[in-house]
Image: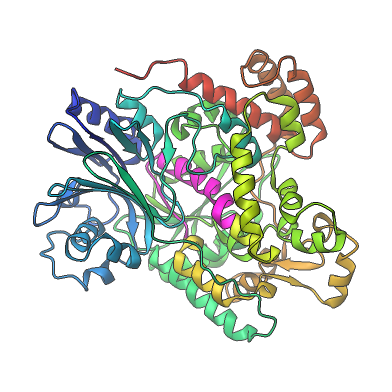
Amino acid sequence: MCGIAGIYAKETVPDLRGRISKMNDSIAHRGPDSGAYYIAQGRIALGHRRLSIIDLREVANQPMTSSNGNWNIVFNGEIYNFKEIKEELSYPFGTDSDTEVIIAAVQEKGIDWFLERANGMFTMALFNAATEDLYLVRDRLGIKPLYYFDNGKHLIFASEVKAILSSGLVEAIFNERAVDEYLANRYVRAPYTFFENIRQVEPGTYQQYRKSLSGVTKTYWDLPKVFNMAEEFDEEALKNGLESELKKAIEYRLMADVPLGTYLSGGVDSSYITAVTALAKKDKVNSYTIGFEELNEFEYAQVIADKYGTSHHEILMEKQDYLANWERLIGFKDAPLGVPNEIPLAIMSSKLREKITVVLSGEGADELMGGYGRIFRAPFDYENQKPSESFYDYFIKKYDYVPRSMRDQLINTPIDYRDEFDRRVRCDFEKNPNEENVFRFFHRYHVKGLLQRVDMTTMQTSVEARVPFLDHKLIEYVYGEIPYLLKLKWIDETARNNARHQTGDEYSEVLDIPKYLLREVSYRYLPEEIITRRKVGFPVPLTEWFENLEDLANDLLVNCSWLKEGVVADLIAKSKMEVRAGQILWMFINIELFKKQYFQTDWRW
């Protein structure tokens, strides 16, 4: 795992070497093992910071140039099947790295040929010195981040926004339209960011730029068109098929020339990954869990650690540790934190860096198999309640984190993004069954916020996180082969009928079994007490700390520009009435902490 940065300009850039060097330095945490850059014509620079995972030798450092001298690459990520791709090429390889396989494939077969075959997580910049074309590429699911600034004169890109700002060519302008978007989703959907003039490269696309800086975007992957709604199937055969695909996805991600371990919360997803990893690895696996005195799942994680003989590490976190790391981590994310558990995850990553460099994590399992039972059952509830509003409007009320009515009463920023995505998603929802729409929405949008979280929390301490449940081949298999009825399964017909008189909040995991087929496969690896317990998530006791948050709100929010005048007391009162009382107030505070850190300095030089 690494960090990349670059500048492509129409004309010569003053102190180009100094600018790319500062960009590299700003993301040194992503790659502490080496740093270098490529410069040409006084207007093109590619920077790279390396975290060595595959082929640790200096010869595998980047930027890397192809054998014919035309192609230059900076690459962040892993290509898990690079050895298979390598067998299809006749290139004179000088390393055992996946980076060289990329540049060899692009030279011999072209970028589209490579992307069609590549299984991995990646962002990369490819510059062809002969044609002067630059390609910015992002992986299918958006596992790795890639941001860019384009004013027609300078194209500046990087793995993190701070590197773009460190170029000295970009002004940091607070994007007020992102406030409503963040409060709804806990992150800002692509292509937008909290910076007015900086965007994200969309997942599953690459952008090609000519030397005139005119650019075109090509989509090379999207979610599968097929979504299995069959009512007749061979459950045993599908169970075996799912197990095989899961095993393949996890074992692909065990490829490393450095020590590797797992997050282990004690839930089904992380426990399953830990089990398969422990069985596949010859050496004892390091596993990690973190919690608070008030809230933790240590006993369940220990059950799996004992069963598979992992070298298990429990990290107990205290309130003062949490509060002390809050602003520091905003400075790594270049955005307000979205989920309270980002802070403990980051602290856990700092701890695991003492022993390992690569960690496997369970993000994506709920989106793949219907793990958020309350909201994945929205189509069933909608059918029974028969409200007058559209299914999209019904669904989005359940999904939005801070309710729309509360946002409208408290903030004074534009709602352009809300309107844009409402139109887009409402149109998408008209094309498919509602059950399918929910899955597609979570894969297209929700999981991206989780990926931003896992990237920041790990890379801030130079750890690479791998997410096997977001293997694109696994997603294609599940969409096409696993019927909806085996993702969310009713206990029996009586339970289904009883659920008609309740809501998902009441009957989920009581009358039905979310992630049913994954749980069935898990019985081959995990104890029943792990499989059948209710989903908890990663709890942080913010509501118990509400008094601390209230003090922060009164200190920070009274005169902030994006809140309506005189609403802080109302915000605190409304937050107290919400089930998510602590987190809602926490999110509002996050925005102002972020704003003060980034927009009171002139980054240009």
Percent across and percent down for residue 426 are 65, 52
Q: Is residue 533 magenta?
A: no
Number of marks: 0
**Which of 246/352 is in front?**
246
- Residue at 75 percent of width and 32 percent of height: 406
Is 341 above or below relative to 15? below
Q: Main secondary structure of the magenta part?
A: helix
**Which of 25/430 is in front?**
430
- Residue at 55 percent of width and 54 percent of height: 444
Percent across and percent down for residue 5 are 29, 38
- Residue at 83 percent of width and 61 percent of height: 507
Q: Quadrant of the C terminus?
A: top left
**Which of 293/333 is in front?**
333
Is 219 above or below relative to 214? below
Percent across and percent down for residue 293 are 67, 39
Q: Quadrant of residue 555?
A: top right
Residue 495 showing in the rendered view? yes
- Residue at 75 percent of width and 46 percent of height: 397
Left or right: residue 569 compared with residue 19: right
**Which of 500/213 is in front?**
213
Magenta residues (range): 442-467
Residue 309 showing in the rendered view? no
